[in-house]
Image: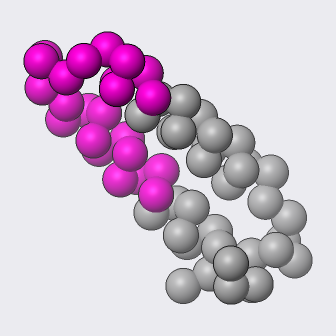
Amino acid sequence: MNRRERLELEVSNIQEKIDKASKDVPSHILNSWKKDLVSLEFELNNLVDGEEDHNY
């Protein structure tokens, strides 16, 4: 699995966790998940083609 695929999977997993979060999840945890999502999306969107094939 290359770096792009791993990032896409992580983004998908966190988005699903946020979407399925119950109402009793503390707001600071939900905010942390959202920050992680933004960070991963930023990394994914700025991934250079040459970086995709390296195993990180």
How is the rendered protein coloured?
one colour
Q: What is the x, y in percent for residue 14?
A: 38, 45
Q: Residue at x 40, y 52 (%)?
A: 12
Q: Residue at x 27, y 41 (%)?
A: 17
Q: What is the x, y in percent for residue 29?
A: 34, 26
The vertical placement of 42 against 3, above or below, is above
- State the quadrant of the C terminus: bottom right
Q: Seen in the image, is 38 located left or right of residue 45?
A: left
Q: Is 19 one of the magenta-colored residues?
A: yes
Q: Quadrant of residue 19?
A: top left
Q: Residue at x 82, y 74 (%)?
A: 51
Disc tally is: 0
Q: Seen in the image, is 39 located left or right of residue 10?
A: right
Q: What is the x, y in percent for residue 39?
A: 63, 40
The vertical placement of 50 against 4, above or below, is below
Q: Residue at x 85, y 64 (%)?
A: 48
- State the quadrant of the N terminus: bottom right
Q: Seen in the image, is 25 located left or right of residue 46?
A: left
| Boundaries of the magenta span | 10-32
Q: What is the x, y in percent for residue 16?
A: 29, 44
Q: Is 24 one of the magenta-colored residues?
A: yes
| Of the pair 6 and 31, the residue shown nearer to us | 31
The vertical placement of 47 against 38, above or below, is below
In terms of secondary structure, what is the magenta stretch mainly? helix
